[in-house]
Amino acid sequence: MTTHDESAIPRTTGKRMWQGMAVLVGVMAVGAAIAIPNWHNFAKNPPPVSAIGTGTSTASTGGTPASASVTAPLPGATSISILAGASVQGNPNFDPNNAQVPLGNKIVWVNKDSVPHTATSGLSASDPASGKIFDTKIISNGQSSPPQQLKGVKVGDIIPYYCQIHPYMTAKITVTAASGSSSSNSSNSSSTAGATASGAGAGPALGILQGASTQGNPAYDPSTLTVKKGESIQVTNKDSVPHTVTNGKDASDPTSGTVQYIRT
């Protein structure tokens, strides 16, 4: 463009043009990271359209659309709900938000929202470990995910996960001891069996107090417990939510969960 005297008027500079292109490339890269792994699911799940119907509305029932049917979860699997309205940032999303999953159990996510979601292990799409432990792929509204088996986990592990479509939807899973009398491996089973046969029930008792899940409240009674070699600890959960008792400083402690105990 020129003025009446034919002098040039620059509209931008080379530096600003390259900055704009860098932003554009960055946005395209993030979009590709989400779209490419789920392309076949996008093809099978076109965007929802508006329609006028005579069925009961979602708003009046507080549930999924009348046309959607939630697949029954696999018997024995841990069920986690994706709540209605979860796609709106700030709303409650996964229920429970910190699911306690026994080692070896499969997990099924039930999408009660009106839009598709995923449940993908990791902190975000940029996490190098994203999807390594589990990835449901896209779960259509009103449907359930295929049962997911957690890969390479152990008791005490805390696994964060998120929705690839709505990355602000986050939650976590805590792996607990396997349900039933058997433990997670043969060596643990033989140790527990030996302790029971030698009168493990006579060992000292440890209580998890009511309200222990609230930070700052008393948690264990007694807070310091003396145990003789060969004795087993009888743990009783008096709180209203699940807990574990796992030796070690935290989940990152390499000795976490290596000491055997019997829970009641």
Image (spheres, rainbow, N blue to C red):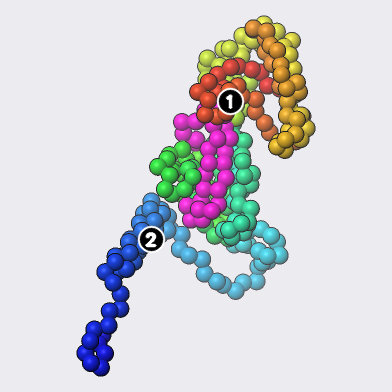
Residue 78 in view here: yes
Instruction: Single out the residue that lies furthest toward the left.
Output: 6
Quarter the N terminus occupies: bottom left
Q: Nearer the viewer, residue 75 or 19?
A: 19
Residue 107: x, y in percent? 55, 40
Q: Secondary structure at mark 1?
A: loop
The picture places residue 142, in percent across and down from the top left corner, at: 58, 56
Q: Nearer the viewer, residue 137 or 204?
A: 204
The residue under the point 43% across, 49% down is 125
Q: Residues within 10 Å of mark 1 (few under 14, many from 20)?
A: few
Q: Earlier in the sequence, mark 1 or mark 2?
A: 2
* Residue type for callout 2: Val
> What range is drawn magenta here?
149-175
Task: Return the x and y of residue 34 as percentages of the image width and height.
Answer: 41, 54
Instruction: Tell me the quarter of the picture where residue 233 sits.
Output: top right
Count of marks overlaid on the render: 2
- Label 2, residues with CA under 10 Å away: few <14, some 14-19, many ≥20: few
Left/right placement of residue 227 relative to residue 8 reads right
Answer above or below: position of 190 versus 112: above
Q: Is residue 170 magenta?
A: yes
Q: Is residue 231 left or right of residue 106?
A: right
Can you say whether 144 is above or below 64 in the image? above
- Labels 1 and 2 touching (C-beta < 8 A): no
Could you give the CA–CA distance between mark 1 and mark 2, rounded to whole angstroms? 41 Å
Q: Which residue is mark 2?
A: 27
Which image quadrant for residue 35? bottom left
Q: Position of residue 216 (x, y in %)?
A: 72, 35
The residue where tag 1 is placed is: 249
Label 1 amino acid?
A: Lys
